[in-house]
């Protein structure tokens, strides 16, 4: 695969930036490649030249958004001494980042391009020795469900309250 870091001002960067917005708002199924290309002012051929196909473009977008968010989550987790407080902090900071980046739809849908869950991997790292096998996947699912609540009409404030309630009661 070609490098994921586009040259500033390049067609690849324009495609990637617009794709992040579109997949973030509409999810995989809601993005039409022809309309995406038209909104950028390029042909679908140019889009396919840089990314191969829709699923490859989605894969780059999904990984980029998850990396941006998990990076913030890591930073939030590192300021605490115990793993459970780190986990709670990471969940809430990640939630805030997903809302701010308008990525709730993208991050709450199944990942059509990979079987790696970067959020679950991070939760696994945060919990370390306190990890019960499989709990990181459950926690990632709860975190993603809180984002899905927003896509289904719940206010971000109420979705965050629900996630916070879960983290206080269950973690």
Image (spheres, rainbow, N blue to C red):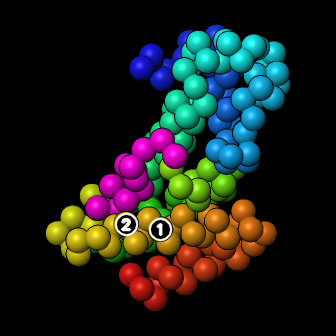
> Disc 1 vs disc 2: Cβ atoms closer than 8 Å?
yes
Residue 83 visible somewhere in the drawing: no
Dividing the picture into quarters, in which one does residue 58 lie?
Answer: top right
Relative to 42, does residue 130 appear above or below in the rendering? below
- The numbered disc on residue 71 is none
What residue is disc 1 on?
141
Residue 118 in magenta?
yes
Quadrant occupied by the C terminus: bottom left
Disc 1 versus disc 2: distance between alpha carbons?
6 Å
Residue 69 in magenta?
no
- The numbered disc on residue 137 is 2
| Range of magenta residues | 112-124
Q: Using residue 74 as the reference point, say whether residue 107 is left or right of it.
A: right
Residue 41: image x %, image y %? 81, 15
Q: Nearer the viewer, residue 109 or 103?
A: 109
The residue lying at 60 percent from left, 70 percent from top is: 146
The residue lying at 61 percent from left, 80 percent from top is: 162
Dividing the picture into quarters, in which one does residue 144 lie?
Answer: bottom right
Q: What element carries label 2?
A: helix
Relative to 53, does residue 130 appear above or below in the rendering? below
Count neighbours of disc 2 (C-alpha within 10 A) and say few if under 14, some if 14 to 19, many if 20 or more.
some
The residue lying at 71 percent from left, 66 percent from top is: 150
Q: Determine the residue located farthest toward the bottom in the rendered image.
A: 169
Relative to 168, does residue 98 appear above or below in the rendering? above
Residue 148 visible somewhere in the drawing: yes
Q: Using residue 30 as the reference point, say whether residue 79 is left or right of it.
A: left
Q: Determine the residue located farthest toward the left in the rendered image.
A: 129
């Amino acid at each position: 695969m070609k490098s994921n870091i586009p040259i500033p001002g390049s067609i690849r960067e324009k495609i990637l930036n617009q794709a992040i917005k579109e997949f973030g708002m509409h999810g995989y199924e809601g993005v039409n490649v022809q309309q995406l290309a038209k909104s950028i002012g390029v042909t679908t051929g140019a889009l396919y030249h840089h990314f191969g196909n829709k699923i490859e473009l989605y894969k780059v977008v999904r990984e980029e958004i998850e990396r941006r968010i998990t990076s913030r989550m890591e930073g939030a987790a590192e300021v605490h001494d115990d793993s459970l407080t780190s986990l709670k902090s990471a969940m809430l900071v990640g939630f805030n980042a997903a809302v701010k980046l308008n990525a709730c739809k993208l991050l709450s849908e199944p990942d059509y391009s990979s079987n790696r869950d970067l959020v679950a991997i991070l939760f696994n790292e945060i919990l370390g020795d306190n990890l019960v096998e499989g709990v990181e996947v459950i926690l990632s699912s709860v975190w993603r469900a809180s984002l899905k609540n927003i896509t289904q009409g719940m206010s971000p404030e109420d979705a965050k309250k629900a996630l916070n309630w879960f983290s206080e009661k269950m973690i």
